[in-house]
Structure formats: structure tokens, C-alpha cells
Image: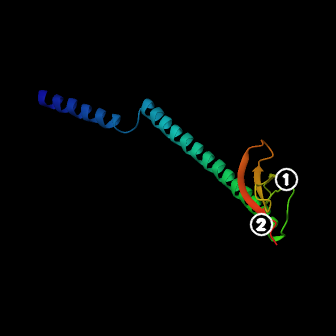
Amino acid sequence: MASGCSRCAEARAAGARRAGARGFTLVEVLVALTIVAVALLASLRAVGNLTQSSANLKARTFAQWSAENRLAQIRVQSEWPNPGANQYDCSQAGVQLTCREEVFATPNTSFRRIEISVLDPADGHRLARLVGFATNLP
């Protein structure tokens, strides 16, 4: 009978081990949820940065195009701009932009240096800058 009781004790111990192996403890679940939450927050932050970078790149691209368009217009129309500064709206594709055009005399009287800065009107931050020349040659 002693051997029968030892078998009963072994069976109870094995059953207790199986019962404990059936699920996770509360601490394990909380640790797993914390890890998942941190990973989700990191991915949300990365997506937010990507979205912001994309919008910034779009604004800089349109700013560069605006500056290039103005220099091309000066060349095509053979404009001879007067020295000084001028500021105007140069929005592109729904992106609000402000262009500041500065014209400088050069030592050669047949050339004028033109600097075009494209600014974000919301904060005045420069998005693009382009330097070109206009000629007054026959």
C-alpha cells in the first residue's frame, strides 16, 4: 500500500505541474503588454516623423520649382530687373510660399545677380535659395 500512496503523490505532483503550465501568470501578461505598448509607441513615432519629413520634402521641392520658374521667366522674357528687393506670393500646388527676390548690380554692367529665396509664410523659414544672373547683352 505504501507503493500505491507514492504513486498517488507522484500523480498529484505531475497534475499540479501540468495545471501550472496551462497559462501565463499575471506578471508575465503585464510584461508582455508593456513590451507591445512600447513597440507600438515607437512605430507610431516613426510613422509621424515619416509623415512630417514627407510634407517638408514636398514644400522644399515646390519652393525650388518656384525659384527656378522665376529665373527661367527672367531669362525667357529677357527681363532686366532693377537692383533692389521684391517680395511676392509664389505658391505652388496648394503649398503656400513667399518668394523674396533680390537683384544686385555686378562689376560688369551687362550682368545683374539675382538671388531668390523661397520662404514658408507661416514661420519665415527659408525652404530654398537660388542664385542666377540676368544679362543685358544685345
Residue topped by disc 2: 72
- Looking at the image, can residue 96 be seen? no
Direction from residue 37 to residue 15 in the image, left or right:
left
| Colour pattern | rainbow
Identify the residue shown where x is 54% and y is 41%. 42
11, 4: nearer the viewer? 11
Q: Residues within 10 Å of mark 2 (few under 14, many from 20)?
A: few
Kindly check if marks 2 and 1 are in contact, taking CB atoms under 8 A apart as contact: no
N-term mark: 2 or 1:
2
Identify the residue shown where x is 20% and y is 32%. 10
Direction from residue 78 to residue 45 in the image, left or right:
left
Residue topped by disc 1: 83
Question: Which element carries disc 2, helix, strand or loop?
Answer: helix
As shown in the figure, which amino acid type bears the numbered disc 2? Ala
- The number of callouts visible is 2
Instruction: Single out the mark in the foreground, 2 or 1.
Output: 1
